[in-house]
Image: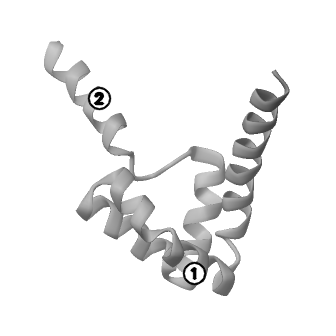
Amino acid sequence: MTTLKRRIIRAGGWGVAKRLIKPIPVVGSVFAFGLAGYEIKKKGLIPGVVHVGLDVTPFVGTAKGVLELFTGDLIPDKSDRKSVKSVVTRR
């Protein structure tokens, strides 16, 4: 039980750290570029490249990061887009 709790805390801590580091202009750009492969894999080629491109641009990435703190991701992941399409086609 302790290891499960520790894993959850670590995962949550890492997510918070990513959200806090990305809005810092220069450090955030380096950090976003380092995570480019992960983001492209998660979002798809074109949406992932757009997402990383916006994050790497210093002040645009800062504005996007601050906005996403309150609203969530502007560009949805592949799995999120598939679930939205299946709901729309069923109607």
Mark 1: secondary structure: helix
Q: Is residue 44 left or right of residue 89?
A: right
Residue 76, given in percent of the width and then of the height, sits at 39, 46
**Colouring convention used in this rendered image of the protein:** one colour
Residue in the picture at 67% in, 70% down: 23
Residue 90 lies, with reference to residue 53, above or below; the image says above
Q: Residues within 10 Å of mark 2 (few under 14, many from 20)?
A: few
Residue 86 lies, with reference to residue 91, above or below; the image says below
Q: Amino acid at mark 1?
A: Ser
Work out whether residue 9 or residue 82 is closer to the camera in this orientation and state it.
9
**Residue bearing mark 1:** 29
Q: Is residue 56 left or right of residue 51?
A: right
Mark 2: secondary structure: helix
Residue in the picture at 40% in, 67% down: 37
Circle nearer the viewer, 1 or 2? 1
Report which quarter residue 39 is drawn in: bottom left
Residue 65 lies, with reference to residue 81, above or below; the image says below
**Residue bearing mark 2:** 84
- Which corner quadrant holds the N terminus? top right
Residue 13, given in percent of the width and then of the height, sits at 77, 49
Q: Residues within 10 Å of mark 1 (few under 14, many from 20)?
A: many
Residue 2, given in percent of the width and then of the height, sits at 85, 27
Residue 17, given in percent of the width and then of the height, sits at 74, 59
